[in-house]
Amino acid sequence: MGCGMWFLSSLMLSSIMSLCIITGCQSQSHTHAVSESGHHISIGQTYEVQLPFQAGTGYAWSLDQSDSSGLDLISLTDHGVVRSGASAHVQVGGPMHSVWEVRGLQAGMVTLHFVLQRPWESGVAPAESRTVRIRVKPADSDTSAVTGEE
């Protein structure tokens, strides 16, 4: 291999290594936790949880059942993903929301812990987490409590 080819090969290898280092730094996840509280529903009423994320990143929201409590007091339905904003078309890499519906079944306190992570990455901390606290009141309670006001 001539001196010119060796130089080009070294330059290409150096560029690829720099790209891997830069990409590696950008893909490091930093856990961001958000806690929501003050949501109240009566038995039979529903509350919608919307969790934002960027499409095309591989990240998806899921319920962490081990860190959640009161799951027997509600029914939880995953309504899938909806696009965010007023755009009529799905934008590649655009903002999206995972939508979950909570229906009160029995009175008590519910804590839902959601995590945003890539399903194929095991042993990696979630990029973000959300904790949603909901108080399910008896059906004869004041219905204005749905607003979260006490």
Image: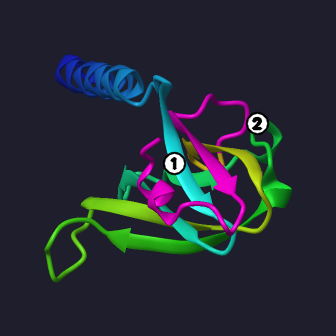
Residue 55 % position (x, y): 35, 59
Above or below, 135 against 102 in this view is: above
Question: What residue does disc 2 label?
Answer: 67
**Can residue 100 be spotted in the picture?**
no
Tag 1–tag 2 contact (CB < 8 Å): no
The residue depicted at 76 percent of the width and 36 percent of the height is: 67
Secondary structure state at the residue bearing disc 2: helix
- Drawn side of residue 138 relative to residue 89, left or right: right
| Other-residue count near label 2 (Cα within 10 Å), few / some / many at <14 / 14–19 / ≥20 | few
Above or below, 71 against 42 in this view is: above
Q: Indicate the amino acid at tag 2.
A: Asp
Residue 131 on the magenta segment: yes
Q: Which residues are magenta?
A: 121-150
Relative depth, front residue between 83 and 1: 83
**Can residue 137 be spotted in the picture?**
yes
The residue depicted at 51 percent of the width and 65 percent of the height is: 143
Q: Indicate the amino acid at tag 1.
A: His
Residue 133 % position (x, y): 60, 42
Secondary structure state at the residue bearing disc 1: strand
Question: What residue does disc 1 label?
Answer: 39
